[in-house]
Each structure stands twice: as structure tokens, then as C-alpha cells.
Image (cartoon, rainbow, N blue to C red):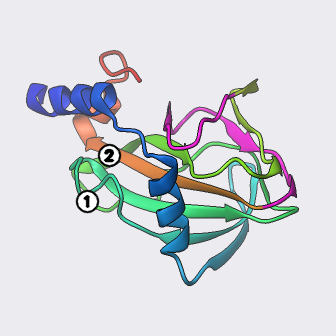
Amino acid sequence: MLGNYRVYIEINTVMDSLTPQECQAIIDSISSWEPLHVTKKLGGELKFKQAPIIQWGNKYPYILHELVLRYDVGDYCTLHIDSKWRNINPRLSAYAVWITPLNDDYEGGELYFDGKLVEQVVGVPNKYKRTIPHEITPVTQGTRYSLVSWLFLPVEDARNKNTISL
């Protein structure tokens, strides 16, 4: 268990940022988008387009699920908490999420964690526990792109909330 915990701390403290060119290359690499419009059982409505991608998962073994999200004008995520539906491995549990903005040439689309506006810098991940309420306001002009990566931990480590911090 301690070994897994150290890996998590290493990931948290040495997390790379992406250059603007790398961010644009990710956007340009996607040729097909899947629309998503759902109302979550525990509250929250999500409306955007998504495409699977692997960016951090090649370098960090506990990043096991990644999507690029595309928010066109009018797209948004109301206040919600991420669920544990990403049960990729029964011994691992989704613990945290990293949202990496890929562009900034849009209006609206502000990111709030627990009611607080979060500064978004292209290529720099915003990290939070998946249980923190968050939202993205409607995009009013342009298109917002972000890379969303889910960090998984061994179930016993994910349950031990007193020893793991972001």
C-alpha cells in the first residue's frame, strides 16, 4: 500500500504541463466527436462532445481514462460530482480528476470547483478529488477544449482519505 501511495505523490508533484503546440496537436488529432447530453442521478446536467485519447496514461500508470471534451456555444456542465462509473479494474477506484485546458480563445466556459472560480492556463492541469462539486458555465463564444484525465488508486488507498491529498 505504501508503494502505491508514493507513486501517487510522485504523479501529483511532477505532473507535466503541455505546451500550447501540444495542446493544439491534441485538438487537431481528433476527427470524430461523440455528443453527450445527460442528467446525472445525483444531480447535474452535462452537455458537450467527447473523444477518447491517451496523453498522460502512457507516462503515469494510474491515469487510466482520458477524454478530450469539446464545448460549443451553449454547451455546459451544471454543478455535479463525478461518479465512480469508471470501474476499469475492480482493485482500482477513480479518485481524482485532472482537467487540462487545451485552448483559451472562447468566452464563457468558466470552471468552478466548490463554488470558486478556477484560473485556467492552457496546458496546465487543474487537479481535484472526484467528489468535489464542480461546474462549467455555458460557452458563449468560440469552442472550449479540455483534456480530462481520471486518476485511479488501489481501492484501499482511495478509501483512506486522511492520508491522500491533492
**Quarter containing the C terminus:** top left
Residue 60 is at least partly visible in this image: yes
**Quarter containing the N terminus:** top left
> Residue 44: image x %, image y %?
75, 50
Marks 2 and 1, the one that precedes in the sequence: 1
Q: Which residue is mark 2?
A: 152
> Residue 23: image x %, image y %?
50, 55
**Is residue 24 shown left or right of residue 14?**
right
Residue 86 is at least partly visible in this image: no
**Is residue 118 shown left or right of residue 61?**
right
Residue at 49% in and 38% down: 125
The residue nearer to you, when weighing 140 against 94, is 140
Q: Is residue 135 magenta?
A: yes
> Residue 92: image x %, image y %?
26, 49
Q: Residue furthest top?
A: 162
Query: Which range is magenta?
Result: 118-142
Which label sits in the foreground, 2 or 1? 2
Q: Residue furthest bottom?
A: 32
The kind of residue tagged 2 is Phe
Residue at 82% in and 60% down: 142
Q: Main secondary structure of the magenta part?
A: loop
> Residue 32: image x %, image y %?
57, 84
**Is residue 133 shown left or right of residue 85?**
right
State the separation of the CA atoms marked 2 and 1.
9 Å
Mark 2 secondary-structure assignment? strand
Residue at 50% in and 37% down: 124
Q: Which residue is mark 1?
A: 89
Q: Is residue 152 magenta?
A: no
Mark 1 secondary-structure assignment? loop
The kind of residue tagged 1 is Asn
Contact between labelled residues 1 and 2, with CB atoms less than 8 Å apart? yes
Which quarter of the figure has residue 122?
top right
